[in-house]
Amino acid sequence: MTHLFRDTKTKNVRKVPSIPIKQVYQYLVTIKKTLHTRNAQSKQENIQSIQGNAQSIQGNTQFIQGNTQFIQENTQSIQGNIQFIQGNAQSIQGNRNAQSIQGNTQFIQGNTQSIQGNTQSIQGNTQFIQGNTQSIQGNTQSIQGNTQSIQGNTQSIQGNTQSIQGNTQSIQGNTQSIQGNTQSIQGNTQSIQGNTQSIQGNTQSIQAIILVKIL
């Protein structure tokens, strides 16, 4: 089909092919479907890859005292960064992420860790770790100068009470992979003193989660 078209500049009349109504309708339907698809919300498992990063924390003092941090339904990507999480009780719930740890080199040297006079009570919990894939390959871990098998560091844990009974922790279907990272923690002092942490009758569910780093 054609219809006549008059050019407003030249005043000439020429024939122009018409677009069938059915074709116009199908085009509008296609646009509607496309917009609907773009606006649709999708929740997909995220993959977090920390590769070839160097993390160096030297000569720092870390105090952990009585804070609470909740991370829920989040996706966290940390690459080549230095992260300090201090004085926190961390709960990470309902994330659908994948973390991978492979071929890492970890050095912990010349550190002093003192944990004194603390009371930690975790009661009534059950721990389930199901269907997880954890790949730790080609890693080199060197702990030197420490009192736990190693050379020169001092670890002092005195007058603490630790009770872990019947808590519920569920970690299901996770993939964890960290590749080609170098972590160096040297000459640090960590002091956790006189704190009371009580977690009683709680249910902690961690499913398909990214657990980054807690120093």
Image (tube, rainbow, N blue to C red):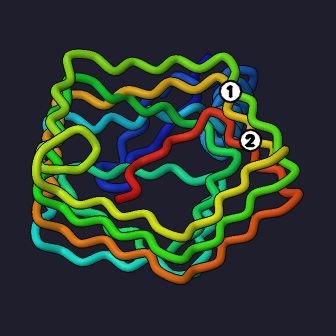
Secondary structure of residue under mark 1: strand
Q: What amino acid type is highlighted by mark number 1?
A: Ile
**Closer to the camera, 51 or 161?**
161
**Closer to the camera, 45 or 103?**
103
* Disc on res. 62: none
* Quadrant into which the N terminus falls: top right
* Disc on res. 169: 2
In the picture shown, does residue 109 fall above or below 30? below
* Quadrant into which the C terminus falls: bottom left
Q: Which residue is mark 1?
A: 129
Q: Position of residue 131 (x, y in %)?
A: 66, 16
Disc 1 and disc 2 in contact, CB within 8 angstroms: yes
Say which quarter of the image contains residue 207.
top right
Secondary structure of residue under mark 2: strand
Q: How many marks?
A: 2
User: What residue do we see at 64% from left, 64% from top?
Assistant: 161
**Closer to the camera, 203 or 110?**
110
Q: What amino acid type is highlighted by mark number 2?
A: Gln
Q: Does residue 30 appear to the left or right of 8 in the view shown? A: right
